[in-house]
Image (cartoon, grey):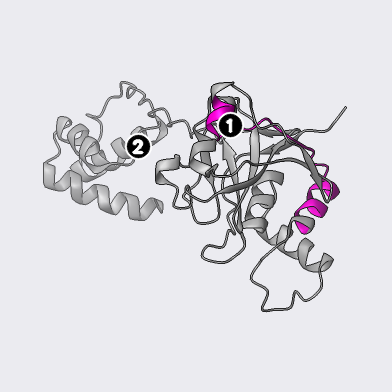
Amino acid sequence: MTDLIRTTLQAPEDARKGLGNCGVFALAVASGSSEQYVWDWLRGKGKGRSGNWKGSTTTKNQAQFLQAHGIQTEAVALPATSTAMARNAVPYARQAVLHGINASPAPKRLTAARLARCPEFQDGSVYLVWTTGHIQLMYKGRLMDQNSAGLVAPSEYRLARKEVKMVARLVNVTTEPVAPAEPKAPRKRKAPVAQDWSTIDSPCARAWALYDHLLEQGWELKCAPYAEQAMALGVSKNTAKTQFYHWRKARGL
């Protein structure tokens, strides 16, 4: 059984923008790796990649990485672009194996935007799309490269009008979107336990005793509700607030 490669389809934290590193970025996202890992791996496999290397890759480099990391590719039927093919509902179904990548060479005049809008590519699979001098990821009709803010619609993708050269489906790459963080439940206040405060004569001492008591009950350290509670015990508002400040300082809170 083929091992699944899990990806969140999120840009790596160390992603670099503005460089010609579209191949490095696409491979990092597809494999769920950091960009630095892919960068170092490709640098070690190719010649002429000195400290000035900006991340440019060839199809052969990309194929080497995909094969080494167990990512399988598959050719797909592409939408027709000629009038005759469209009239007869004949898809462009050529297949090719380029350096070990099973992919579909695209017909002429097929743009990335047109490809992304096709219903056939809304199946939840992850695709690698090669356009003129560029490579990007496609998922559910959205496109992504190193300069986009994640997966974006074709209308928001700046290179959507580039002509598609080749498309491959990543067979064993599964998406695992990042779940939004659940909001924290508000902390429930415990009702203060009844206590006889009449035995404490000093208003200041009475306020301190109240604050200690509420702290034990799990109340949040906010001045306003503490002051209200203290005032209910016959402590003035100013005394309550002043003593609250001194109490927090003394308790190291």
Q: Residue furthest right?
A: 1
Q: Residues within 10 Å of mark 2 (few under 14, many from 20)?
A: few
> Residue 166, image x and y in percent?
67, 45
User: Could you tell me the amino acid type at mark 1?
Assistant: Ala
Tell me if label 1 and label 2 are in contact, CB under 8 Å: no
> Residue 30, image x and y in percent?
68, 44
Q: Secondary structure at mark 2?
A: loop
In the depicted structure, whether residue 51 falls above or below residue 70: below
Task: State how far apart marks 1 and 2 are (Cα).
Answer: 65 Å
* Sequence order check, earlier mark of 1 and 2: 1
> Residue 238, image x and y in percent?
12, 47
Q: Nearer the viewer, residue 161 or 83?
A: 83
Residue bearing the label numbered 2: 220
> Residue 198, image x and y in percent?
22, 29
Q: Secondary structure at mark 1?
A: loop
Residue bearing the label numbered 1: 80
In the depicted structure, whether residue 111 falls above or below residue 23: above
Instruction: Say whether residue 82 is magenta.
Output: yes
User: Could you tell me the amino acid type at mark 2?
Assistant: Glu
Q: Is residue 206 left or right of residue 55?
A: left
The part of the chain drawn in magenta is 61-86
Q: Residue furthest front?
A: 84
Determine the image quadrant of residue 211.
Answer: top left
